[in-house]
Amino acid sequence: MRLIIIGAPGAGKGTQAVNLSERLNVPHISTGDIFREIIEAGTHLGIEAKSYIEKGLLVPDELTISIVKDRIAKDDCKEGFLLDGFPRTIPQAEQFDEFLDNNDIKLDAVINLEVLDDVIVKRMEGRRVCKVCGRSYHIYSNPPKANGVCDFCGKQLVIRDDDKKETVLERLKTYYEKTTPLIDYYEKKKLLLHFDGTKAISETTEEIMERLLKKQVVS
Ligand code: AP5
Ligand code: MG
């Protein structure tokens, strides 16, 4: 199964993607997580990516697309994948479609999580993330079992560098300018499924699973 999950920063893409990748047994590929890994590793590409991410801007399309193509070509993506946060621009979507066509791969659905801006700003203020596995928590709405520690890998939770309020507002601006045209793009391809991202996390996961079942993407 080949899925994409799109939505504003903080809409819950990563949170839903973790649940769905477990349920559907497909790898969760987050371009944001990949960029954070290469930044941490201090590679040349990481240094370039950081200069955009810290300003709330998008990493250039060419770099992002080549990273995704390399990742999708790996063996664990043969039976499917769940892309979180890619594509994020029309050129990314077009070049990704070309890549899929050339490799005889078809997308099954694009999940769009809808959340209003004021909810997003509150979510980002309380978000804590695990640097090791990328899981997101929230100090009030989705707390870890033990304060400040990841439930899954036991590592310390941190605040993401780009979760400062001014960077969040910049990321939202970038989202409306560059990413919202994708809603139309995938709607025209009859791939888009809309979800209210403000419901309880598990409720949204169930709704997504039900819709995928109805669309006969899962059996
Ligand atoms: P990325 O890491 O993808 O950031 P983002 O899109 O801004 O999204 P987030 O990860 O911040 O939010 P999310 O939707 O995953 O929400 P989460 O589940 O954590 O990208 C970072 C940067 O990398 C970009 O700004 C860009 O510079 C660059 N980049 C990445 N991809 C790129 C691309 N394709 N092209 C170019 N550049 C790219 O949830 C948020 C919070 O809400 C958490 O605290 C969570 O616990 C809580 N929460 C989640 N769901 C609920 C719920 N239902 N109810 C209550 N709380 C909830
Ligand atoms: Mg995320």
Image (tube, helix red, strand yellow):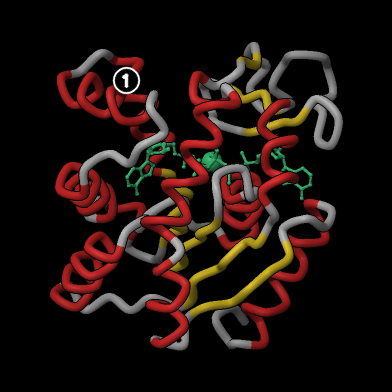
Where ligand 1 lies, by quadrant? top right
State the SS at label 1: helix
| Nearest the eye: 197 or 120 | 120
Residue visible at 67% across and 23% down? 128
Residue visible at 29% across and 65% down? 90
Q: Where is residue 196, by image quadrant?
A: bottom right
| Nearest the eye: 172 or 65 | 172
The C terminus: image quadrant: bottom right
Left or right of 173? Residue 55 is left
Q: Position of residue 154 (x, y in %)?
A: 68, 16
From what the image shows, is residue 149 above or below residue 61?
above
From what the image shows, is residue 22 above or below residue 181?
above
Left or right of 43? Residue 155 is right
| Nearest the eye: 166 or 59 | 166
Q: Position of residue 16 (x, y in %)?
A: 64, 52
Residue visible at 39% across and 86% down? 189
Q: Where is residue 31, by image quadrant?
A: top left
From what the image shows, is residue 79 above or below residue 27?
below
Mark 1 burial class by Cα count in 10 Å: few <14, some 14-19, many 20+: some
- Residue wearing tag 1: 39
Left or right of 74? Residue 150 is right
Q: Position of residue 132 (x, y in %)?
A: 51, 22
Question: Looking at the picture, which amino acid does disc 1 mark?
Answer: Ile
| Nearest the eye: 121 or 78 | 121
Residue visible at 76% across and 30% down? 138
